[in-house]
Amino acid sequence: MCGIIGFTGLKQAAPILLEGLSRMEYRGYDSAGMAVTSPEGLLQLARVSGKVAGLYDRTENGAAFPGACGIAHTRWATHGAPTEANAHPQVSMHGRFAVAHNGIIENFAALKKELIEKGYAFTSQTDTEIVANLLEDSYRGDFQEAVEKMLARIEGSYAFAILCADHPGELFAVRMNSPLILGLGEGFNLFASDVTALVSHTRRVVYMDDGDYARVTPDEVALFAKDGSPKALRETRVNISLAEAEKGGFEHFMMKEIFEQPEALEKTIASRIRGGEIVLDDFRLESESLKNIQKIVITACGSAYYAGLAGRYAIEKLCRIPVDVKLASELRYEDPLIDGRTMLIVLSQSGETLDTIAAMKECKARGAKVLAIVNVAASTIARLADHVLYTWAGPEIAVATTKGYTTQLAVLDLFAVYAARQLGRLDEEEYAAWMQKIRELPGLVRKALALEPAMADLAVLLKDAEHVFFLGRNTDSALAMEGALKLKEISYIHAEAYAAGELKHGTIALLEEGTPVIALCCNQALLEKTASNIIEVKARGAKTIAVAPEGAAQEVLASCADRCVFVPAADDIFSAMIAVVPLQLLAYHTAKLRGCSIDKPKNLAKSVTVE
Ligand code: AGP
């Protein structure tokens, strides 16, 4: 997953391209580059391996690259190692075309063979270089015609920024399965993978659809559909502030976003509980259509998958509809038992995760109705779904999701109570009681944030650990998975989650003297059971940390666990949203003690738009 940006206008392009890359570095940061047309019509190219800072140096903060039209790219490597030669923009053999690309060209091998037979030489291992040479091979003086001919030949997922040295001031933007947004200005126009790269220049944006391409000049943006027919510009206004994209006084985006959770949850919940009922935007599920649903399948990847595992309990408990939670990367290939009586719920913070998109398309093709729960407006998943419920968490920049996860839980909880009411499983009084419990959740999360100092202390116990185990039952086992992922993806400590009842079936053999074991005891109905697991592992030398609701058998836990963390009490089916907060804080402080790159962990990117 990469970040691309193009600018053309009256100002110098290079500083604007650099600033845009800096705002998109969370999308991928193992190499970067830019191409700017000089006032004399020369194509100036700079590429570095490593982060965008290297490009600032190479171009003297842009000053060494005069010109008012250019493209730039920050990369998360797919084809080819993160070297300078493989960095984008990739340039055609005779230096006429430069291309920055986010995605994968699936038929690149055949095209490369064809171009080599025509005499083209290649200098990189990338699929993108094929696109640059295809453009050159198709070019007879007309830039747009060359773009259209190239697009007719390639297959796969892509967002392109394309520059041609023979056409100074003119760029092409192309979107297919990778995000690209046009920014409209006065005397300039630009486009980028992410709106945070546009907002400091304009708030007037156009979200491109898959298949769209646009000719962009300083005075005009001409948009075309995949078939070449002109499309009107559906302009919308972006209302996020730059502050939202900045760190807001915190050292890392991740901590900012952990502390934004109460506000994000308020935004996600409050506007959907009004007039004594839950209103899920324009999503309406009449009781008849709900009764026709044979099962619900939730599909996602990573933390979104773990949110599905946790949210499942609320839906099954209140609606009594079977819920399957499936990894998208598995669901797409398992010839799934999905039909018109299946409701598919897709969870994704970015709305661009390729495996999740592919699984969604597979299930749609089999007749499933799709409800998407996403955080990024007009993202690919949002646009493909039959219904969308946004999590309204605001931009999430840190690679490790926090507010994205908890707001997904909030929407699942709202859906569960809404659907249970529609199905007649809740009477008025029960409905009101459950709504009130959901309303209280943001405040309980705010209270849980007060645990930060305690979690910073506990991080000392973990920082030198080689292995850490997270245990839990029922809702706590789903939470354990998210807790383990948070820790491993930012501190690089091996962490695993186990259903507490599974310990004796093998895992307990792994325990060594001093191994940290975090036991989640927030499901109060099963607390005693998990407490006995704590005793089991402690007897084998584990350092035990229990996470439990305040007041819940505190003396029992205090007598068996080495350390206890007490969180605000919530109903079992909502407890993951509260208890995840200390686990997020523990992961953050452990990673910090270990000197890890918290917002941009190694090998990871914010949204995985490749297979
Ligand atoms: C979570 O901290 C990770 N960054 C990762 O597992 C992420 O949840 C996963 O890639 C899914 O991303 P999405 O929600 O944007 O689809």
Image: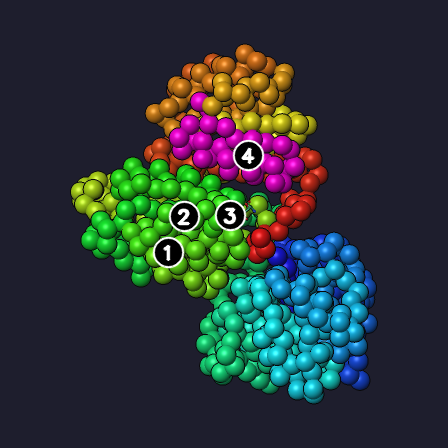
Q: Residue at x 50, y 28 (%)?
A: 498
Residue neighbourhood size for the residue with mark 2, other residues' Cα within 10 Å, grouped as few (<14), some (14–19), many (≥20)? few
Q: Is residue 108 magenta?
A: no
- Residue 329 - label: 3
Residue type beneath disc 4: Ala
Q: Name the residue under label 2.
A: 336
Query: Bounds of the magenta span?
Result: 473-501
Quarter-wise, where is residue 37 in the image? Answer: bottom right
Q: Name the residue under label 1.
A: 366
Residue type beneath disc 3: Ser
Q: What is the CA distance from the residue labelled 1 to the residue labelled 3?
A: 17 Å
Sequence-wise, the earlier of marks 1 and 3 is: 3
Residue 544 image position (x, y, % from top left)? 54, 20
The answer to whether one can see residue 243 in this image is: yes
* Nearer mark to the viewer, of 1 and 3: 1
Q: What is the CA distance from the residue labelled 4 to the residue labelled 3?
A: 20 Å
Mark 3 and mark 1 in contact (Cβ < 8 Å)? no
Q: Which residue is drawn at 50% across and 35% down?
A: 481
Looking at this view, is 238 or 52 the one in front?
52
Q: Mark 4 points at which residue?
A: 484
Mark 2 and mark 4 in contact (Cβ < 8 Å)? no
For residue 600, side relative to residue 92 (left or right):
left
Residue type beneath disc 2: Pro
Ligand 1 within 8 Å of disc 1? The answer is: no
SS category of the residue bearing label 4: helix
Sequence-wise, the earlier of marks 4 and 3 is: 3
Q: Which residue, as the protein is rendered here, is positioned at the far bottom?
A: 141
Q: Residue at x 20, y 53 (%)?
A: 288
Compared with residue 74, is residue 62 higher up or lower down, i.e. above or below?
below
Mark 2 and mark 1 in contact (Cβ < 8 Å)? yes
Residue neighbourhood size for the residue with mark 3, other residues' Cα within 10 Å, grouped as few (<14), some (14–19), many (≥20)? some
